[in-house]
Image (tube, coloured by chain):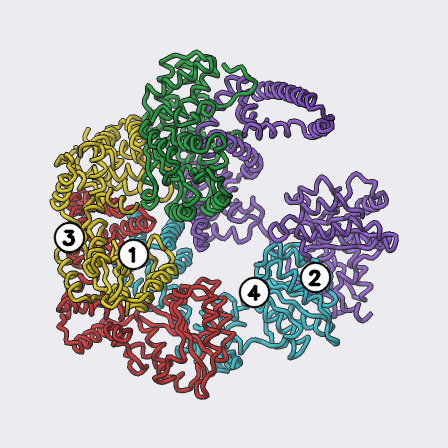
Chain colours: A yellow, B green, C red, D cyan, E purple
Amino acid sequence: MSKSVSELLWAEKYRPKSLKELVNQEEIVKRLMKFVEERNMPHLLFAGPPGTGKTTAALALAHDLYGEDWRKYVLELNASDERGIAVIRSKVKEFARSKLPGDIPFKIVILDEADNMTADAQQALRRIMEMFVETTRFILIANFPSKIIEPIQSRCASFRFTPLKKEDVVSRLKWICEQENVVCHQDALETIYEISEGDMRKAINILQAAAALGEVTVSHVYKVVGLAHPKEIREILNLALQGKFIESRDRLRELMVTYGLSGTDVLKQMHREIFSADLKIPEDVRVTIADYIGEIQFRIVEGADDEIQLTALLAKLALLGKKISSMKG
Amino acid sequence: MSKSVSELLWAEKYRPKSLKELVNQEEIVKRLMKFVEERNMPHLLFAGPPGTGKTTAALALAHDLYGEDWRKYVLELNASDERGIAVIRSKVKEFARSKLPGDIPFKIVILDEADNMTADAQQALRRIMEMFVETTRFILIANFPSKIIEPIQSRCASFRFTPLKKEDVVSRLKWICEQENVVCHQDALETIYEISEGDMRKAINILQAAAALGEVTVSHVYKVVGLAHPKEIREILNLALQGKFIESRDRLRELMVTYGLSGTDVLKQMHREIFSADLKIPEDVRVTIADYIGEIQFRIVEGADDEIQLTALLAKLALLGKKISSMKG
Amino acid sequence: MSKSVSELLWAEKYRPKSLKELVNQEEIVKRLMKFVEERNMPHLLFAGPPGTGKTTAALALAHDLYGEDWRKYVLELNASDERGIAVIRSKVKEFARSKLPGDIPFKIVILDEADNMTADAQQALRRIMEMFVETTRFILIANFPSKIIEPIQSRCASFRFTPLKKEDVVSRLKWICEQENVVCHQDALETIYEISEGDMRKAINILQAAAALGEVTVSHVYKVVGLAHPKEIREILNLALQGKFIESRDRLRELMVTYGLSGTDVLKQMHREIFSADLKIPEDVRVTIADYIGEIQFRIVEGADDEIQLTALLAKLALLGKKISSMKG
Amino acid sequence: MSKSVSELLWAEKYRPKSLKELVNQEEIVKRLMKFVEERNMPHLLFAGPPGTGKTTAALALAHDLYGEDWRKYVLELNASDERGIAVIRSKVKEFARSKLPGDIPFKIVILDEADNMTADAQQALRRIMEMFVETTRFILIANFPSKIIEPIQSRCASFRFTPLKKEDVVSRLKWICEQENVVCHQDALETIYEISEGDMRKAINILQAAAALGEVTVSHVYKVVGLAHPKEIREILNLALQGKFIESRDRLRELMVTYGLSGTDVLKQMHREIFSADLKIPEDVRVTIADYIGEIQFRIVEGADDEIQLTALLAKLALLGKKISSMKG
Amino acid sequence: MAQEARLPWIIKYRPKRLDEVVDQEEAKAKILEWLKKWPNVPKKALLLYGPPGCGKTSLVEAVANELGYEVLEMNASDFRRKEDIEKVAIRASTMQSLIASGRKKLILLDEVDGIADREDAGGLEAVAELVKISKVPIVMTANNPWDPKLRVLREIAEFVEFKKLRKDDIIRILERICIAEKLKCDKEALDYIATRAEGDARAAINDLQAIGEGFGEVTLERAKALLRPRDKERDPFETLKLLFSAKYAWQAKSVLNQSQLDYEQLKLWLEENIPNQFSDLEDVSRAYEALSKADVYLGRIIRTGDWDLLAYAIDLMTAGVSLSAKNNPRDKDRWTKYSFPQRLLLMSKLKDSRKIRDDLATILAQHLHISTSTAKAEIIPILRAIFISNPEYAAKIAVGLGLSEKMIEMLAGPNKQVVIMHYRRLKEEIEKKAAETIMQLQAKAGRTEKPEARKEKKKEKSQSKTTSTDLTSYFKK
């Protein structure tokens, strides 16, 4: 089952298996290859935004170290899965205890999302890392290195992964489309890049879902990610700014129903549109809207009602529009 | 209309019992029927706007799997009514424990409004889903799929329910009217569709209420909508805007006692009133009120006492009314 | 291995072993030496910011009391490890039970981060302290003495550790560089002091990490601590204040990506820059920015979206800038 | 050994052992001595603020009744002991029921902080107090007698302990300083009195800690209690309100370092000072500041950064100050 | 006797005979009569209630003494879980046979309001059961008869009220003790003690002992020195007046220190009275703004558990409200007739109506497979439309869904009479039909009509209620 699933998912199917196949993060790859060569390495900390290849690099490193059997010598833990440090301790203990075959220098524990652990759990982790250091190396993966406590950072060699560049992502997507015999449009691939914000895994997932609808077009892309078409969002903003409060609100409700958007989804899309050249409003209006969106998003995070708060946002926009036009008039 | 001594709500009376009876969401139905055939299925996630048949599909699936006795093998939970994940856990545990007859492959837990759970509760839910996976499958129902955490989404087969089309809703309403021997007008049915925004349950409810007035005409439909939302709220808003603060507050209290409304209920109804044509106030006042309501709703979320916050809102409205009239005067 | 690790870490390698080697906190050292002399002491409470030598002093005291074998008579507990008071009790019991050699007056329990314990746990701790007082003395270590309950405070002789002075830290760092044959720049050492805020351990860790990049320069320092160069932060602030909203936002995104900064990291750095003379803005603008940063930081702590909120902050700055220039103009 | 530790603690060392040594609450002491003389007494309820000698009086009474062996005949239950309804029904009842040794008129149960017991537990106590009155008398000690249920109050003769007078506390402290050969300043002793709010035990603890720093001076006193001098806090508030933002912030940082204050400590002190007549600001401004402080405290409670938030508070004050002066001007 | 001397006086001077019990003549008579008639009494248990120290337990003991009962006591110091009570019940139900061999028995369940919800789970229900089967009289005592948890006892026990003692009675008791103890007593001192006791003889005796014992005399001076008068707390009206008229923030803040109101109550009193005191709308709005912010702090306390925030809530609701009178500062001192918070009066009504609405929503939620909040937001309004516009049809739905009459009242508003009329008629119809069906079935099966007779009887007892719930469960199936 797991095999077939991984073949079905392009993100898995096209995930590089070996360090040699990694096309980005050249600096990092070079250093990692050195470890393979020397068959020795310190604990590692891989930091960077999602989808920049951190996990891929960790697995590829293991692959290159141990060959095809690598899974035997690797324990993968997802920190947000196994929240309790006690679980981590016992699993690592179990894993570290088992004997090493003669030619294997050490085993590897890959700990994903390590920055999601509490400071206390990280303290405990640090001790675990020390306890088993003779037989086991840790690769910690984190989005934000600053959320990893000092003492761990200072025990790890640290690698910083940067977001992939547009051309890299787009050309990779195009290549996959060719492998899969899928028709794709350049603007659709660019939209995918923007939505996925340099996260390769996300990008490939979107690509696959859009391809499932036939062709990879812009509107298919928006459909599969469950986002409204930016044009619609812009229209709502414009309506509100023109003082057509009730109309804008009706449109918004319709949109939310059609696409199944939550309040946060809508705000995120609005936030993106503020920076779009297609929204024809003066820059200072954009600025004010950005300020409002921050306020409303906070309220929703605090548990306020999506609908009431979005209405309040439209109301604020309508008042803003009125003020601007009265100033002009 | 029905001649029997007792009467039920049509939304339930005419709910399809089996997948075969489901007339919309064909794609989804086809996939679900496959599960019935194979007598196996993964966890499911049904997402989509209210009234698009999510719950109906879940119940019909259970019916088709287990036959008339299906209720024995199904646990229905509504996340917004269960107090805390601990309660959910113990209920599921209890339910999962009872033995399965030989021919039943697994039991089903239907968890409605799963997107109302906090991220932490969802994490716990995920663990529960895993714990009982041998004997139990979950069907999670949500309005906004983006509010379901990633790890749950990736463990579920996901189904997206889309809003019903006008012709589907209208023809269904017409069919019900025939069953009930109720005279109905095409334009009235269309009006119902528009008011209910593609929500089938809502549409049928309005239909039944309009039928209770005799015939289903456009004016009856509007009358029903008017009756459903008491004009008291409107009067309270008007009193406050006229500066009659104490009077408006007293009326508010009376209303809350008569109907058993909470502060949040009242605020939601006020929010609805702002958009009602029956409230005769200039549009820019509506806008300002919408802004106030957003602010106060946030405070209700943050605060301890709904009614204090509502009273504060009335005071603000009174002040607003005074300012407006002084500007005019 | 653990030995070599401690040698690898400069913070361990250069940690003073005996009270005599402690160069700061003279008053405290004098009092502690008295205890060694008298071979008697009450329970102790060491309070003060991180990295001011509390743990070092405790260990050095033990060392001076018991000689090289000191580890035998000392039980180190980290409150955040062994949260449960039950664990503490049993460990202390175990430890206190073992016989004392003739010439040892008492054993020592060092309890780190005691202020992280709940009030209830502290109450229980108090009883434990009383229970074993005949054979055992406690040294409690805390950042904030106010978080230690009254009854414990009054049972302890209390010592307040103050942050190290700039010259002390810098000269210590310079001395270490000499020992390690590392080239270092004076301004880099000063930057380390500022970033580490008088925390010696942190300072040494940063020094070591920066040294690993070759020389200890200012830019290496910023690199290893994962912070943007202050100049870049200031530029973003300036762009926003000049109304170049979109540009400032693009720069900010780039920065976050390059350095892997989280929203909180950015805010902390901005906060530091408000007080920098290199940022050429009037004092009242600084004031307003400080207010905004507080608000936005809180929102992010509450779980709001980093990106939306930082954008909102830049928007606020842009609006502020506009207001100022319009007032001038 | 435990003796020497208790001798190390002045609050223990100078705690009166016998009623004769009690220097305050003369009327009550006289009354209690009569009970000793008569070898009879009703149940007693000692009420009053902390540190007014309630527990001391209860223990001294027991001491005078039974002599040095008094602990044998007394059951002491403190707040930190389990005192739920089950304990009352078992442990306390057991003790009350057990036979009297020959020459003792009755046993004593001392329930410290009885007002913290649940109402149910208190209910369970009622009849025990009557049924076993021949062998056992109760002394209940409470800070808030109103939290003792009425039926128990009516079973006790109640005595209200009043806060110690300034001269009493100061002269006691002075006397202790003489015993201990410590130099002390009159104003320091008065400061101790003010901080300890008539709580003798707290006062002596502060005295001892301050003495440990060498002499008992005002600044040593503030240092050991971890409080800033109120005047300094007021100065910071004034600086901020006058718009001297950076200066106020530098002062605040210095203060926090010097006294080892946490953010919350500072906020609490500020909150106290804003209502002080020594801070010359309009009355409604005090409330506004209180709101600001509350907001900032909440943010810190939620996990926001101490430093950023305190800076934000000072910024808010600066902005407020500007507004006030512009309104005047 | 030496032993006796060491007793606290409240024990030493406890009434031992009936005539030593001061006052409470009515209660005495009731108890005596009830005991004499027992078991031929309407209710098989007595519940004596009244404030502490008015002699409830003493009276039971005295009566038992006089009439020769042996008292089996169970009180709050005993575990009173279900199983503990049941043990007593077993003894009680078999005790009759013992009477021949020994004295008559009486069970005293003292302090039944002290049966704890959690630790004594099931205790009160077990007491109710005990009363049913007991072969000996049962007397209970409690302080507050309105305690909701005593509701189960209301139907099975006769409630007998004990009054607060009058001051004169208390003085008489004290005088008697003074004589017995050979205390010189000062009339004013006794008056002072008795006043302070507020009808509680036990408290007064304790005070007397505390002041007098060992000194040989009771003086007003010592009474005042030892027994501080309770702090006089300001009533709500004084509290509000002081708060509104405060010129300084600290003045307004300090009103809570000595008030009968706590901050929660003060919040409600302010909500009610701000517009009574302030006339300017802006001032009013400002004051409510302060109150609203105070409430936000209270909410945050609940969520974070950080009670340090309470200080800020109090600042805002006291000083914040008081200093809001900026446009019309003279309003601050205006004489105002304050009103009692209507919300406190409406609270129980509101609770009832919310309960009805919640129950209704629960029925609808189960019926329609939706959440209760959706039921409230969507379905109840629609039902309301139907109930207002078509009473007959509404009645059918009410029957179909198994709604109660209270629910119908809420939904139908002005139409409630008509809908309920139809509703009752429909139900009768159904019941008739049901009865017919049962008869037919029985005729078919040829059974006796015993089960039906029993059912008929039950129906008489609680008419509409049972049928409506029966219907609910019927339709739930």
Q: Are marks 2 and 3 on the same chain?
A: no
Q: Residue furthest right?
A: E100
Structural crowding at the residue carrying mark 3, measured as other residues with C-alpha within 10 Å and reported as few (<14), some (14–19) or many (≥20): some
Q: Tell me the mark number nearer the camera, choosing from 4 and 3.
A: 3
Q: Is residue E405 above or below residue D212?
A: above
The residue beneath circle 2 is D129
Q: Tell me the mark number nearer the camera, choosing from 2 and 1.
A: 1
SS at mark 2? helix
The residue beneath circle 3 is A22
Q: Is residue B24 left or right of residue A139?
A: right
Identified at 46% across, 88% down, the residue is C102
Structural crowding at the residue carrying mark 1, measured as other residues with C-alpha within 10 Å and reported as few (<14), some (14–19) or many (≥20): some
The amino acid at mark 2 is Met
Q: Residue furthest front?
A: B102
Pinpoint residue C168: horizontal percent, then vertical percent: 24, 74
The residue beneath circle 4 is D81
Q: Is residue B214 left or right of residue B328?
A: right
- Subunit that carries the residue with mark 1: A
Q: Is residue D328 above or below residue D277?
A: above
Pinpoint residue C93: horizontal percent, then vertical percent: 48, 74
Q: CA distance from mark 1 to mark 4?
A: 46 Å
Pinpoint residue B238: horizontal percent, then vertical percent: 42, 26
Q: Is residue A104 left or right of residue B117?
A: left
Identified at 23% across, 70% down, the residue is C204
Disc 2 + disc 3, Cβ < 8 Å? no
Figure quadrant of residue C53? bottom left
Q: CA distance from mark 2 to mark 1?
A: 63 Å
SS at mark 3? loop
